Amino acid sequence: MEEYTDVKKLFGCDVFNDRVMQERLPKKTYRELRKTIEEGSELSLEVADVVAHEMKEWAIEKGATHFSHWFQPLTGVTAEKHDAFITTPGNDGQILLSFSGKELIKGEPDASSFPSGGLRATFEARGYTTWDCTSPAFVRHDAAGGTLCIPTAFCSYTGEALDQKTPLLRSMEAVSHEALRLVRLFGNTTSKKVTPCVGAEQEYFLIDKEKWMQRKDLIYTGRTLFGAMPPKGQEMDDHYLGTIRQRISAYMKEVNEECWRLGVPAKTQHNEVAPAQHELAPIFAPANIAADHNQIMMRILKKVASRHGMRCLLHEKPFAGVNGSGKHNNWSLKTDDGINLLEPGRTPHENVQFLLVLTCILKAVDTHADLLRESAADVGNDQRLGGNEAPPIVISVFLGEQLQDVLDQLISTGTATHSKTGARLKTGVRTLPDFMKDAADRNRTSPFAFTGNKFEFRMVGSRDSISNCNVVLNTIAAEAFREAADRLEKAENFDAAVHDLIKEYAAAHQRIVFNGNGYAPEWEEEAKRRGLPVIPSMVDAIPALTTEKAVRLFEEFHVFTRTELESRAEIQYEIYGKAINIEARTMIDMATKQIIPAVVRYTTVLADSINAVKAAGPVDTSVQMDLLLKTSKLLKSTNSAMGKLSRVVDKISSYKEGRDRAVFCREKVVPAMEALRKPVDELEMLVDKEMWPMPSYGDLIFEV
Ligand code: ADP
Ligand code: MG
């Protein structure tokens, strides 16, 4: 028997959390630190010194030898540099273990090798990491031993954000400030802070490591660039929520335990739609902590897979023809005293504050749909979005029957008098308990769906940081709240003014609401008629970052400066160009060194067989001949498609890095890649499996 896991003991055992701080820190220090965490007051170096000392003592007890400022640069992955706690105070060969307040609050990684989009010339390499005391430090155990990881923000010498976290923290402050103004108008005098809360459901694939090693495309790009569909895909829906096999269960158990140790409240796990696809969701947390949790979780998913002889694929579309992976970003706004501003209550038509918040969000999403779309744009997501599985490429909001009805009443008659309620669910079986249904059903095709007391943004890619979309959600909500507060604070008759405002917003932004099937091809046409942005690819999405509308929005709330936005757009273009370049080169490499030689061998086998059979006597060789002709024809198409791809790839570097190069990749390289894939996938269906130079889709996703 496996030994029994005491979850309560395990949870957070490697985290320097509030309980540990209370136990370890002198009362005065604890109080001051809490004040900084809760109210954002400045942290003195004396407090930092005491905290650092206790943190070090605690970390050493946990087996840590090193500390590391852990940050999230714009590479899309986390970064860290490890320093041992040792110091050598004298010349006597003795060491001390030390960690100062200064080392805790400030780090200085050489920043010249991180993407900055032109923000920082290479010779001005200075970048600083600063302790984010609102996200707890933790000790991570791996092959390197124990490392005290300190969540930090990363800025340039001149204070520009070079990471995902800084703008997220800025946007959290902005939305808190404006949301508080709104709730004050409704007589709330007690709440001190409004925090965006986020729960990110993470999808992933697991495949066998031995097979992964035989696929250069998976190794270099994270996705398959070739691959014919096996006879069976996901059409039977037998994987979704299916029984989890033992090999996977054992993996999930360890993932959960590692997450729990680090305070990541991993909660829900299940098999997803595609074969070999799974999902893990933690309990929601404040947005910056949720973003950290998600990074920790992705790392654990990968690390534990390795231990189990598997690879965890976080790419948005590892396999064509079956569902890709995303991240559902559940988002709500909570006051420090526990009020969820997105909680409609049983009678939403009477909940004026909720209706105001809701219509503000409609306005925000309608006004900045392009930015929200951009926040989910990444190279892998181009393969996934709009593919009849993940959300479509058009941003819209799903409200559900109940809220739609309330808004309809408001728009048509000016007042909402009733809310539809959920009926009793009758199963027709007496032994099954009846219960009240929710007032609205779900819609799985909407990119931004109201799900009871939160919005679920479903567009984010599975590899991507959730920071981007939350920066956008927080800031656009802040803007709408501010505008509403500006008007309502001046109103003579508050009740009438708020009523008018809700009606005005609901009517003006109706077009963003879509409760129908987002996968239907008609929807894109309808969206165009409504004037909603239809943005097919990452390259088309990036310009949203630098429109005057975006610059004004982000500058007003001090989330991004114009320069920061321009640099981010530049980085996005660069990432796109580089990723496509790598994918194209990988295809050429595989086609040249593996696929074409294998097909040539196969045609030789066929030709030899024809000759041998013919020599043996008057026997029919038409089957072999037919195969040989088909194969040779496809081989020729492959070779010519490869020639074309090589020629466009050679031209990539002649385009200026940034937008020009990205546009060229999107317009010329991507189609040439698709053209090469087609004959190769057809060949895979013809060529003797024994001779095909890599594991097939069937081997990869059905035999984990
Ligand atoms: P679903 O029905 O979509 O599976 P769940 O209740 O399981 O919904 O929640 C999915 C994710 O949403 C989880 O990470 C959960 O913690 C998170 N979540 C639940 N309530 C909220 C909320 N009020 N704000 C933000 N996230 C939430
Ligand atoms: Mg969900």
Image: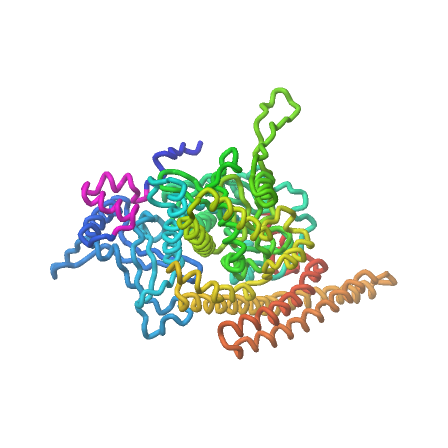
Residue extending farthest right = 618
* Rendered location of residue 191, percent (x, y): 35, 41
* Rendered location of residue 203, percent (x, y): 52, 48
Residue extending farthest bottom = 654
Q: Is residue 669 visible?
A: yes
* Rendered location of residue 607, percent (x, y): 76, 67
Of 296 and 399, nearer the camera is 399
Would residue 269 appear left or right of 148 to someone viewing this image? right
| 19 inside magenta stretch | yes
Would residue 3 appear left or right of 345 to someone viewing this image? left
Would residue 524 appear left or right of 407 to someone viewing this image? right
| 85 inside magenta stretch | no
Of 530 and 338, nearer the camera is 530
Q: How is the image coloured?
A: rainbow
Residue extending farthest front = 492
Name the residue located 57 percent from the left edge and 26 percent from the top edge.
435
Residue 244, image quadrant: top right
Would residue 501 appear left or right of 394 to someone viewing this image? left
The tally of labels here is 0
Of 112 and 88, nearer the camera is 112
Q: Is residue 303 visible?
A: no
- Main SS, magenta region, reads helix
Residue range corresponding to the magenta coloring: 14-41
Residue extending farthest top = 430
Of 572 and 505, nearer the camera is 505
